[in-house]
Amino acid sequence: MKGQKGWDNCLEDQRILIVEDEFLIAIDLSDLLERHGADVEIAGSVSDGFAALDPSEGRFSMALLDVMVGSTEVTPLALAMRQMAIPFVFHSGHAAESPWLQKTFPDAPALAKPAREAEILEALCGLIPG
């Protein structure tokens, strides 16, 4: 576990996709990650998330995914990201009540909303190799 000091620059030069349908939460998360050096893109729907994965737009280092985006589960997007070797963290009010989450994505951390800033940073920084 990295200490707060280790989080100061760990997201520098990381391109992060946030898939979140609640606008204010998405903006707060984006602000947090940008303060720690990340380049952030927000997708407000699963279809927007798929569009953001277009290779011509550049590759994401990682993602922060809500489990339910509107009335749509993020599972198909998460499966596509796994195939593309893009690691992700789930950030959702549904994390605790989704038993399939850990079974289907055992390597993906799952944070319950509202997660503390330190928890989010720790989970995302933990995805960076080395």
Image (tube, rainbow, N blue to C red):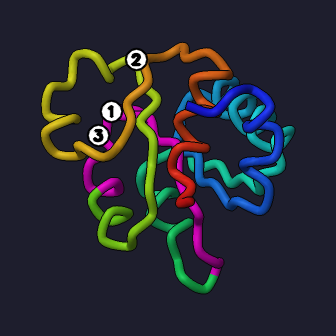
Neighbours of disc 1 within 10 Å: few (<14), some (14-19), many (20+): few
Separation of residues labelled 1 and 3 (CA atoms): 7 Å
Q: Quadrant of the C terminus?
A: bottom right
Q: Residue 114: x percent and y percent?
A: 54, 13
Of 90 and 21, the residue lying toward us: 90
Separation of residues labelled 1 and 2 (CA atoms): 13 Å
Looking at the rendered structure, the number of numbered marks drawn on it comes to 3
Q: Earlier in the sequence, mark 2 or mark 3?
A: 3
In this orientation, does residue 106 appear? yes
Q: Quadrant of residue 55?
A: bottom right
At label 3, the amino acid type is Glu
**Residue extending furthest toward the bottom:** 56
Q: In screen coordinates, is 76 left or right of 10? A: left
Q: Residue 59: x percent and y percent?
A: 59, 74
Which numbered disc, 1 or 2, marks the residue closer to the eye? 2
The residue that mark 2 highlights is 93
Q: Secondary structure at mark 2?
A: loop
Of 34 and 36, the residue lying toward us: 36
The residue that mark 1 highlights is 71
Q: Residue at x 29, y 40 (%)?
A: 73
Neighbours of disc 2 within 10 Å: few (<14), some (14-19), many (20+): some
Q: Which residues are magenta?
A: 57-78
Q: Residue at x 38, y 63 (%)?
A: 81
The residue that mark 3 highlights is 73
Of 53 and 91, the residue lying toward us: 91
Residues at badges 1 and 2 in contact (C-beta under 8 Å)?
no
Q: Residue at x 14, y 26 (%)?
A: 99
At label 1, the amino acid type is Ser
In this orientation, does residue 44 appear? no
Q: Residue at x 69, y 27 (%)?
A: 3
